[in-house]
Amino acid sequence: MQNLEAEDITEKKSEQALLEGARCLIEYIKIHGLNNQSFEIINYLANETIERISQKQDGWQFTNEAIYKAIVGNKAADYSSWFSRYWKKVDEISRIGLEDFARENGYKHFAWIEKKSGGGSGNQSLYFLAEKPVQANVKQSLTNLKSDINYIEITNVSPSWWAKWLFNQGNSATGWRKMIYVLYPIAELIVVFILGSFLWIIAMLNKNPLNAQHVALFLFIIILLLYVRNTLIKWSKIVEDRIVMASDNLLSWGEHDVCLDLVTSPDKKTKILRLVKYASKCPICETEIILDKGEPDFPRRIVGRCKESPREHVYSFDRVTLSGNKLRYPSEHL
């Protein structure tokens, strides 16, 4: 009898933890979710899980067919191939960022999506939410500093096709990968110098008067030099500032608001290049804050800008404590 009571108590605690985790996930999606079917899948799983637990219904696991019909409708389709496209995007949510979000908002649990394989031909895989406890913050000593907002890592970044070769699955570059990125501007400068010198010599050896061909060569050299200058400036900023907004050529189509971060490894022996995306919640209008360049008002700084009021609701960004304070107050402009 006591064993049955203990099992019943344990089951109720598990249900309450899953309810809390699902609610946390819904709140996370409202702020940091994107307008696509990947996040519609997550939102459906969270809302349906809450409803079934609240109404004491069994069956908290869902097939891709059930998810497809709930989101798209009863149209004929290959449910498996449809779901697999969006499952990859669902899996890009940063679990670390979701746990940080739960911690910042006072949740003890967050929900994480898991998959149970069908186990044979004709048996569909099942997808469900599993509750996960929020662990203590190992950076608590740093985050005790007074701040207006705290940033979290929201998604795993999708690099461009060539950056996928440079960065590993964790979107980090160390060792020879990092050296390629570091030495690239220097190699580029050498190549442009040799090419420019060669074109200059050809132009000087030509006995004909100055013509359109000479002008075109000189303009080409100037364009190359300006391109190299721009590359060197970006390279120097990541070395000096340790974090910059990532160039578009490092990111896949449609990816944005991503930082290139130069961090010290845990053993303090090397530096690691990371592609990372941070965000927060605006305490004024409760919408998402994303990172952006500080120019023109805050040059050489990365700041957090509210999506609803990007020029007025502006916050600092500390890459070590992942916290920020207001840089501009509405009252200053009244």
Image (cartoon, rainbow, N blue to C red):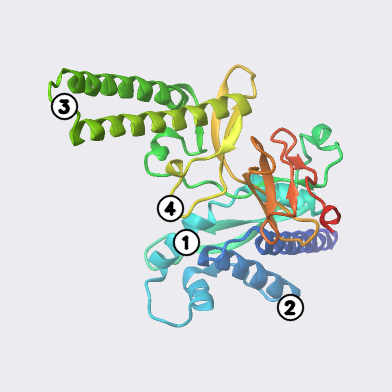
Name the one closer to the observer, 119 or 173: 173
Q: Secondary structure at mark 2?
A: loop
Up the image or down, 63 lies above or below 212; here it is: below
Quick one: quadrant of the N terminus?
bottom right
Residue designated by label 2:
55
Question: Which of the labelled discs sits on residue 209, or is there none?
Answer: 3
Nearer to us: label 3 or label 2: 3
Does the rendering let one see residue 118? no
Q: Secondary structure at mark 4?
A: loop
Nearer to us: label 3 or label 4: 3
Q: Amino acid at mark 3?
A: Pro
Quadrant in the rendering for residue 206: top left
Q: As drawn, is 262 to the left or to the right of 315?
A: left
| Residue 53 percent coordinates (x, y) | 72, 71
Q: Amino acid at mark 1?
A: Tyr
Residue at (41% x, 67% y) in the render: 82
Residue designated by label 1:
86
Quick one: quadrant of the C terminus?
bottom right
Q: CA distance from mark 1 to mark 2?
A: 29 Å
Q: Earlier in the sequence, mark 3 or mark 4?
A: 3
Q: Secondary structure at mark 1?
A: helix
| Residue 222 percent coordinates (x, y) | 35, 30
